[in-house]
Amino acid sequence: AQRLVQSGGGSVQPGGSLTLSCHISGVLYGSDCEAWFRDVPGKKREGVAGRCGDGGLYYADSVKGRFTISRGVLQMDDLKSEDTAMYYCAFERGRPLSGMLNPEGYRFWGQGTQVTVSS
């Protein structure tokens, strides 16, 4: 089983930037996929960004142009108060059939890290 360990996050003012990292242990293949999700109390878990090693980048409309996903990293720029959430990285072997930004498609998860955007 893959083990995911997250780092980064914290508090920032609106318009600021934060970087989240996700270290994935074990052997990785080009067809592996990873994604970032976020939880806000009272709302469904939201897919934020996803990528697979063999190509394709996926973003929620709410973060397009502000967030950038790369292998093991989520770069978040121009942060807004509505980005405040607990963020999780997720990993799966191969492209999830349920969709890149559907949490049901991922078996392996990081421990979560809090991001707070506030003035």
Image (cartoon, rainbow, N blue to C red):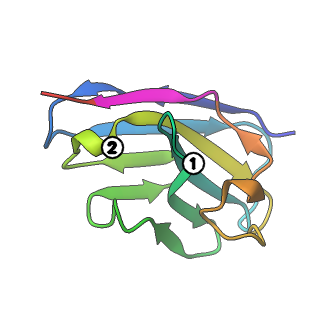
Could you tell me if residue 94 is visible in this image? Answer: yes
Decide whether residue 112 is among the magenta residues: yes
Q: Picture quarter containing residue 95?
A: bottom right
How far apart are the alpha carbons under marks 1 and 2? 14 Å
Is 84 drawn above or below residue 56 in the view shown? Answer: above
Look at 15% across and 38% down and name the residue there: 14
Look at 57% across and 39% down and name the residue there: 88
Q: Position of residue 65 (x, y in %)?
A: 27, 66
Q: Which residue carries the number 1 mark?
A: 44
Residue range highlighted in magenta: 111-116
Decide whether residue 21 is among the magenta residues: no
Whether residue 88 sits left or right of residue 91 in the image: it is: left
Figure quadrant of the N terminus = top right
Could you tell me if residue 71 is visible in this image? Answer: no
Main secondary structure of the magenta stretch = strand
Q: Position of residue 6 (x, y in %)?
A: 56, 30
Look at 49% across and 33% down and name the residue there: 41
Whether residue 109 sits left or right of residue 15 in the image: it is: right
Whether residue 15 sits left or right of residue 32 in the image: it is: left
Q: SS class of the residue under badge 1? A: loop
Q: Position of residue 84 (x, y in %)?
A: 34, 36
| Residue furthest front in the image | 42
Q: Which residue carries the number 2 mark?
A: 83
Crowding at mark 1 (Cα within 10 Å: few <14, some 14-19, many 20+)? few
Look at 61% across and 36% down and name the residue there: 23
Marks 1 and 2 in Cβ contact (< 8 Å): no
Figure quadrant of the C terminus = top left
Q: SS class of the residue under badge 2? A: helix
Crowding at mark 2 (Cα within 10 Å: few <14, some 14-19, many 20+)? many
